Amino acid sequence: MSDIILEKKVDVKISKCEKFRNLFDFSSKDLIIQKCTVFNNSLFEQTQSFVVIHSNTDTELNESLVLLKLIKTNDIFYVSYSVNLWYVIESMPIYKLSEGDLIKISNYKFRIRQLIRTNSALNLHQEMYVPVNIQYPNLVCKFCSLNHNEKSNPLFCPCNCNDTIVHLECYHKWINSSLYLFDIFDDSYIYTPVICDVCNSIYPTRIIMNQLKIVLIDLPNIEPPIIILENIIKEPNDFKGHAKTGFHIISLANKSVKLGRNHDCNVRIPDVSISKCHAFIHYDKNEFIIEDNKSQFGTFVKCQTRKNIQLFDNSEIHISVGQYCFSLTQS
Ligand SMILES: [Zn+2]
Ligand SMILES: [Zn+2]
């Protein structure tokens, strides 16, 4: 008898839930579930009532109705990259975070700005290069109204407003007094960048002058490992404190970061769509690991490698696209 070579296939389970503020309710008892097995390229199209599966991925469809595309190359399946895909963290055995990752809990988004494993500098904003020998004949320092210009204390333009110049020393004093830090504890604080009212650029806190790197602000010392989460959402005005735009700077030395609605959370979001204890970030074996705490509206990390996502045999992956959740297993 000759060997039978089985072609690879993917078992697909598609769950859909009714809308609550555009969120997928993982606790819902009324999920609409569709199951199928595909053996080749497949395109999943959203329709009014259910998902239609096309075997020809070149089918001309309105892009907004395409939920997911599976591509088979050399007997391996890939999920075609698209901007709308999010990994569902609840179902992942382990998800290691990387700098630049975008995480979403319910509808609130945070960028992983920096992951600090050992003592290294906080990298909150880009460094600004300060030239030392530029003359500004008709301008004066915004703070002291003088225009002396020395190598050790040069005049420079700190934002995109071309008519604003400052002395480095005047600016240094000002940026320190304008710093907005709140919720300062031994192991965490929230930092809000200082932004120019006119041009909206972030004022620099680190500069390079005469090839020297100079840090202009003093931030509280906390023990590494440290995670910096940038809150990238614009909150409604009635949201106070913790949910403002800014950076959560949190030590993970001997503890996990807790995200949720409860008062004891390190990142607290007072919104009913957020579970009391929604998600954790742990530090384990040099890695920052995110874990969902069986939250109602889920924890997600954006698929943003801009590459197709390879499926591995018998390893299920879970991807959320809008109102749908796809579970995919290749075998
Ligand atoms: Zn000055
Ligand atoms: Zn400006």
Image (spheres, rainbow, N blue to C red):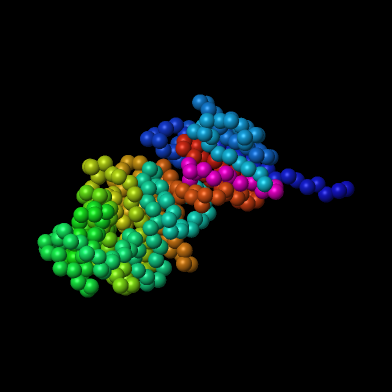
Q: Position of residue 272 (x, y in %)?
A: 32, 41
Q: Residue at image x 35%, y 63%?
A: 123
Closest to the observer, 91 or 68: 68
Relative to residue 131, is residue 142 drawn left or right?
left
Between 35 and 212, the residue placed more toward the observer is 212
Residue 188 spot, x, y in % from top left: 30, 62
- Hey, which residue is sitting farthest front in the picture? 137
Residue 282: image quadrant is: bottom left
From the top left corner, tell me how far across and down residue 320 is, in percent: 49, 42
Point out the residue furthest to the right here: 1
Q: Is residue 20 magenta?
A: no
- What span is colored magenta in the figure? 74-86
Q: Is residue 181 left or right of residue 300?
A: left
Spot the residue most to the left: 145
Q: Quadrant of residue 13?
A: top right
In this image, 53 relative to 110: left or right?
right
Residue 331 in view: no
Relative height, residue 62 to residue 238 (above, below): above
Residue at (54%, 45%) from the top-left corner? 81
Q: Which residue is pictured at 31% across the width and 65% down the height? A: 129
The secondary structure that most of the magenta stretch takes on is: loop
Residue 83 colored in magenta in the image: yes
Looking at the image, residue 98 lies above or below residue 262: below
Seen from the viewer's position, the closer of residues 155 and 76 is: 155
Q: Is residue 170 left or right of residue 303?
A: left
Q: Is residue 311 visible?
A: yes
Say which of 276 and 40 sits in front. Answer: 40
- Residue at image x 48%, y 58%? 96
Residue 136: x %, y % from top left: 20, 61
